[in-house]
Structure formats: structure tokens, C-alpha cells
């Protein structure tokens, strides 16, 4: 990875590293921080934690990942952030499991993860990238919109301990 594509200077100073592969214990830590922090921040229940676990397990067990890719952010060898790009049919990519633990927020890691994953999908020849998020996740939504994603749909769902509005964002490269 080139220095200019690497983390912001504040993150280097804080001892943050980036990894493309899961190591033993990373899956458990990733799901733990998603579950506990999203409960604290948004009231998401244990079903949300299982949903995140399923996404990560499907990613890890994919025997033909092709252009799918992970970015795991670690501090002191513990996962503190993530984003996954999952290859979809029709030359599309999906951004999944964007997360930065509150212990390292303020280092611009969320923005870096989104920008890096968008750069990767563009350079890998995808036609577009999309994601689903939940209304009210304002920090993430601000990053998506400032990176060029456009809101293309929404649906009301009763999940994760309450009624939620899921919002779809897309960024087209062609």
C-alpha cells in the first residue's frame, strides 16, 4: 500500500494499522465492537449483532472472493474498525460493515475507509458501488454523501429492536 493511500497522520501516530485478511480472533472482536457500540449509539439489539456476524462469516467463507476485499483497522493488534467490499452480479460492488470503534473516533478513519473502498472499486473496474444504511447514522451518511453517494431508495423495517428506515445509497462510475 502506498504511503499516500494509507491512513491519516493522526492514525499513524495513534498506532493504527490496516490489514486485508482476518487473523484468529478478528472475527469475534469485529462482531463484538459492532454489537456493543451500535447498541450504545443506536439501541440496536442482539439481532443486529447476529446480522453483522452473518455478513462477516459469509465474506470469510467465500471460497472465490474475486474482487471482494476487506480493510480491518487495528490498534495494538485488535480490530477497531472495518469495511468490506463484496462483489455483486452485473459488475456491482456493495460496501458492508463500515465501522469505527468509539475508542479511535476522531482520527478520520471512517472517511478513510469509505474513500479507500471507493478508490478500490473504481480502480478494480466496477460500474457502481451501493450500500444500505439506517436513517439516523448521521456520521456515516455525511461521509457517504460527501464522497459522492446518492440516496436512491428507502424502506421501513422492524429490525434490531425497533422500527427503522433503511436507506440505499449508490455511486456510479460509468
Image: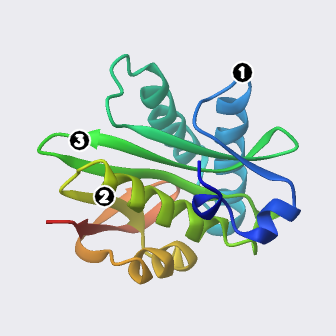
Q: Is residue 159 left or right of residue 99?
A: left
**Circle 1 sits on which residue?**
24
SS class of the residue under badge 1? loop
Frontmost of labels 2 and 3 is 2
First along the sequence among labels 2 and 3: 3
Q: Are discs 2 and 3 less than 8 Å apart at CB? A: no
For discs 1 and 2, the disc positioned in front in the rendered view = 2
107 or 135: nearer the eye?
107
Q: Nearer the viewer, residue 151 or 64?
A: 64
What colour-coding does the image apply?
A: rainbow
Asked if marks 1 and 2 touch (Cβ < 8 Å), the reply is no
Which residue is at 53% across, 47% downward? 48
- Locate the C terminus by quadrant: bottom left
In three-dimensional space, the C-alpha distance between marks 3 and 1, rounded to whole angstroms, equals 27 Å
Residue where numbered disc 2 is placed: 122
Q: Is residue 28 left or right of residue 168?
A: right
What numbered label is drawn on residue 88? 3
**Viewed as shown, does residue 80 lie left or right of 90?**
right
Nearest the eye: 133 or 13: 13
Q: Characterize the local packing of mark 2: few (<14), some (14-19) or many (20 or more) Cα atoms within 10 angstroms.
A: some
Sequence-first disc among 3 and 1: 1
Where residue 129 sits, quadrant-wise, is bottom left
Q: Residues within 10 Å of mark 1 (few under 14, many from 20)?
A: few
Cα–Cα span, label 2 and label 3: 14 Å
Amino acid at each position: 500500500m502506498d504511503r499516500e493511500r494509507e491512513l491519516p497522520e493522526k492514525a499513524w501516530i495513534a498506532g493504527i494499522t490496516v490489514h486485508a485478511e482476518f487473523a484468529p480472533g478478528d472475527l469475534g472482536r469485529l462482531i463484538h465492537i459492532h454489537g456493543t457500540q451500535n447498541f450504545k449509539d443506536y439501541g440496536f439489539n442482539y439481532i443486529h449483532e447476529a446480522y453483522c456476524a452473518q455478513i462477516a462469516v459469509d465474506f470469510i467463507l467465500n471460497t472465490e472472493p474475486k474482487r471482494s476485499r476487506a480493510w480491518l483497522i487495528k490498534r495494538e493488534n485488535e480490530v477497531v474498525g472495518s469495511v468490506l467490499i463484496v462483489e455483486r452480479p452485473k459488475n456491482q460492488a456493495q460496501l458492508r460493515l463500515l465501522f469505527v470503534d468509539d475508542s479511535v473516533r476522531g482520527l478520520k478513519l471512517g472517511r478513510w475507509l469509505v474513500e479507500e473502498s471507493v478508490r478500490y472499486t473504481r480502480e478494480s473496474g466496477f460500474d457502481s458501488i451501493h450500500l444500505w444504511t439506517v436513517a439516523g447514522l448521521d456520521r456515516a451518511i455525511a461521509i457517504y454523501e460527501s464522497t459522492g453517494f446518492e440516496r436512491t431508495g428507502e424502506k421501513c423495517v422492524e429490525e434490531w429492536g425497533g422500527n427503522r428506515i433503511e436507506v440505499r445509497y449508490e455511486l456510479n462510475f460509468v
